[in-house]
Each structure stands twice: as structure tokens, then as C-alpha cells.
Image: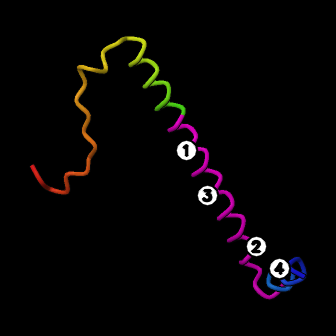
Amino acid sequence: MDNVLTKWIQRLFPRHRERELELDQSSRRVALSIGLYKNMSQEIQAEIERNKFSKYLVYDRGDHHGYH
């Protein structure tokens, strides 16, 4: 039933298929970016642990919202 509805919408709105493809492509790019960020974060954390200098770092969580 869902497939029939999708085909019917695509026939009525040809641009719908293009939008679906754009959304799918964007979703994949976001997922890839998140994956790359997580991997890089893990690599940085591992390097910090290996070098034993994490106790000297000051972390800024970025949640100050204008407060000093």
C-alpha cells in the first residue's frame, strides 16, 4: 500500500522524487560527518591519554551564554 501511494505521489509531483533524493543524500552526509567527528574525537582522547597531559588541559564546555 505504501509503495502504491509513493508511486502515485511521484506521478503527481515529479519534483517529489528529486526532493527525496536530496534529503537522502543530505542525511548520508550528516551521518558521515558525525561518524568522522566521533572518530576524530576518540583519536584525540586516546592521544591525550597516551601523552598523559590531560590533567594540564582546561576544558571549555561552551555553555557560558555570555557569562564571564
Residue 27, horizontal then vertical, whole percent: 63, 57
In the rendered image, residue 14, in percent from the top left (x then y), is placed at: 77, 80
Amino acid type, callout 1: Ser
- Is 30 in front, or is 67? 67
Q: What secondary structure is found at the residue carrying circle 4?
A: helix
Q: Nearer the viewer, residue 36 or 49?
A: 49
Task: Name the amino acid type tagged 2.
Answer: Arg
Residue wearing tag 3: 26
Instruction: Give the residue at x 49% y 24%.
Output: 43
Q: Tell me the residue that label 2 is attached to.
A: 17
- Whether tag 2 and tag 4 are in contact, CB under 8 A, the answer is no
Residue at (26% x, 34% y) in the render: 59
- Residue reaching furthest left? 68
Majority secondary structure of magenta residues: helix
Q: Amino acid at mark 4?
A: Thr
The Cα atoms of the two marked residues, 2 and 4, are separated by: 9 Å
Segment colored magenta: 11-38
Name the residue: 52% across, 37% down: 38
Q: Is residue 14 magenta?
A: yes
N-term-proximal mark, 3 vs 4: 4
Q: Secondary structure at mark 3?
A: helix
Q: Is residue 32 left or right of residue 37?
A: right
The residue identified by callout 4 is 6
Residue at point 28%, 43% (across, down): 61
